[in-house]
Amino acid sequence: MRLNSWIYLLAWLGLVLLVSLACSFGQPAIEPTSTPYSLPTLDSGPASSPSKLPSGDCSQDSQPTDQDVQDALDFTGAAFSSADWSRSYTVTADRVTVTWMNDAESALGYLENLVYPCGYTQDDVDTFFSEQNLKDVILQNYDRPELKSSCSINKQKLDLFEMTAWLHEQSYLVRIWVTQPSDTRLIYVFLTFPDSGADSLQQVAQNLFPMLPMCLR
């Protein structure tokens, strides 16, 4: 009787195992949650954006005011209002920086409101946002940056640079707008999406700068 009991138990366990395997083979594999392989990055600070005039000695206080902070936070309007975007900001000695991250689309929005107590000229802006500086300074964290197009609206002191770059074997579309609200303030906005997010990038660009969302080719 004891031997028969063991035979019965082993047979029952074998049947359970076979049924379990059959069920697992009959079901589709569970895909891992889709998350971006890597998020685009942009360093803030003097090494990656214009913190001083290319020439001249500026000794006045460059600390941003409360209005500078509010201007930076309000500048983009509703362009990043979707729940997909998370916002953070910092205030340092000469600038207000605002960052928007979109994990779902592996996208980045970035703004700097720069304080220039001694004032600046368009030549100063042109010097910093030259093609070489765009590649070597602003896009220093990316590989193979390439300037595709640039355009301006002189009356509004608005410049746009369209670029491509790579990060962790992912190709990104990049747009950088530079504008001068006053003689002592400069704002630049950096926006990037993967190639696959071209339509989303265009939609955000249209909301950001409807007068110059892209350069006409």
Image (tube, rainbow, N blue to C red):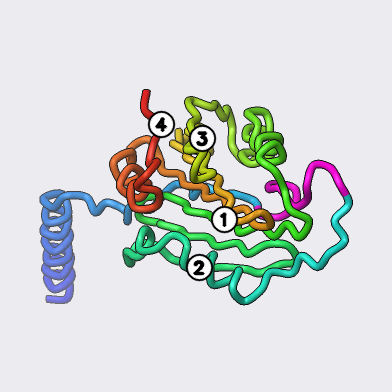
Q: Position of residue 5 (x, y in %)?
A: 13, 73
Magenta segment includes 109: no
Query: For this rendering, which residue is in front, 156 or 63?
Result: 156
Q: Is residue 47 left or right of residue 16?
A: right
State which tag comes first along the sequence, 2 or 3.
2
Would you name the residue on which mark 3 appears?
A: 161
Give the x, y percent position of residue 150. 50, 30
Q: Amino acid at mark 4?
A: Cys
Q: Which mark is residue 181?
A: 1
Name the residue beneath numbered marker 2: 73
Label 4 sits on a secondary structure element that is loop
In front: label 3 or label 1: 1
Q: Does residue 101 lie above or below 175 as drawn?
A: below
Name the disc covering residue 13, or none: none
Q: Kindly report the distance in space between the C-alpha atoms of the residues bearing marks 1 and 2.
A: 15 Å
| First to last magenta residue range | 44-56
Task: Tell me which amino acid carries mark 2.
Answer: Leu
> Mark 1 or mark 2, which is nearer to you?
1
* In this picture, residue 57 sits left or right of residue 73: right
Q: Nearer the viewer, residue 103 or 65?
A: 65
